[in-house]
Image: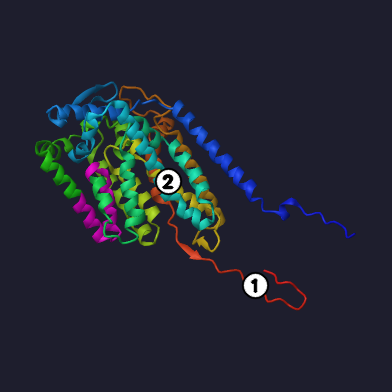
Amino acid sequence: MPADHDVPPAAATDDPGGKTVRRLVVTVVLAAVVPVVYFLGTPHNFFDLKIYMRAMRWWADGEPLYNYVQPDRVQGELYFTYPPFTALLLRPFADLRLGATVATFTILTSLAIVVTTWWLVTPIADRRGIPRWFAAGLAIPLVFAAESTRETITFGQINMLLVVLILADLLYAVPRNSRWAGVGIGLATALKLYPGIFIVYLLTARRWREAAVASASAAVATLLAAAIAPSDSWRFWTHELWTTNRVGRTDYTGNQSLFGLLSRLTVPDKPNQVLWLALVVLVGGYGLWRASRAARGGDGLAGLALTGLVGSLVSPITWTHHVYWFIPAVVVLVDAGLAPAHSWEPRGFGRRHRRALLVLAVVVYASVAYGVVSFHDWGVAPEPTDSPVEFVLRNMYVLLAVLLLVVLPTRRYVTRPAPTVSPPRSGVPATR
């Protein structure tokens, strides 16, 4: 009998079943950790959503919408601060029971998180030969665990609706030159003003038609609201919009904008307006320049991440649930930091550079998962930052956003040459 040859198990099979099981275990463990993070964080009990519903019932009873006010132990007084177009969309919920409204908002927000995360990671998974379900199974729990997501869900905020509209435009409609490109950004701007920064981004990226469509969409939605609620619309656009103290205390740690950082340094005095405007021009101009270069270079994901970070920095008020834009930034960092995939490789990234990008991705994600308010009680009274450590902790998102404006890479992929196969010589097997 011929001798049996022992074949190492690794050589005998690729063990695809074992790999799938391991991947399933990792995704299940990640998903199981998410509820623990929510349990340990600050419970908000859908505080903002309850304000919306009380304001809607107040409005339904015939009272002026922007007269609604309720006391708050941290902010003093809280009002309904959104544009009239948002009020029109929220008005039907005034007739629902609170439990039904909470369930509806939570389910829709969760679906939006799943869909937008799928949009972010599946193109990268396809390019790198990673199963889509595994990439999404890793990313979705991590997005749910980020502080901006936790605050959005537990406050009952509408931020993920805006993210869906913006990402649908910039990841799909704009690259495909759809006739509807710009509509999503325009509607998001009519709902909550800060997405207007993406109209500026379209202009800097020389997407003139899309910027015009976005502006027209925002105008049409705003005029529709004015036709239905003329007095409330007039009051909002001529008075309430310019009364920033209605939104809340600018020095509160949850305000992660440049103005918030300056306010925490100068409280109880107001920060120097000229200094703030100079920082807005400098940071906003540089960030939009980088975003437009990324867009024109073919990296729309980096462009939208940079633009979102610019918007969070230059707005006078940027609550922690507004700062979703670290999520696409981390996706860019991870993709640029991974080893070249198949027939593609990111141009200009050496091994050390890629390693540094992966480290930065871990640092950024760990920071936004830990957050600035979820596990800290910064007190109720206005207090200036009085130590370097406190300065970093209370302004972590601002500092990270500024850093990313400088170092977030623009991915430019080039085709790697296919490996050459030497022609076999007689009696010699072909080698690569």
Residue tagged 1: 421
Residue in the picture at 34% in, 61% down: 176
Above or below, 14 against 137 in this view is below
Q: Main secondary structure of the magenta part?
A: helix
Q: CA distance from mark 1 to mark 2?
A: 40 Å
Q: Position of residue 387 (x, y in %)?
A: 41, 29
Q: Is residue 1 left or right of residue 361?
A: right
What's the mark number on residue 210?
Answer: none
Q: Position of residue 122 (x, y in %)?
A: 46, 52
Q: Is residue 403 visible?
A: no
Residue in the picture at 36% in, 58% down: 295
Magenta stretch: includes residue 206: yes
Q: Position of residue 257 (x, y in %)?
A: 32, 39
Q: Position of residue 178 (x, y in %)?
A: 30, 60
Question: Which is nearer the eye, 295 or 131?
Answer: 131
How is this picture coloured?
rainbow
Quadrant into which the N terminus falls: bottom right
Q: Earlier in the sequence, mark 1 or mark 2?
A: 2
Q: What's drawn in magenta, residue-wise?
A: 190-217
Helix, strand or loop at disc 2? helix
Q: Is residue 59 left or right of residue 153?
A: left
Residue in the picture at 22% in, 30% down: 94
**Which residue of the protein is positioned furthest toward the left in this rendering?**
231
The picture quadrant where one finds residue 151 is top left
Residue tagged 2: 117
Q: Amino acid at mark 2?
A: Thr
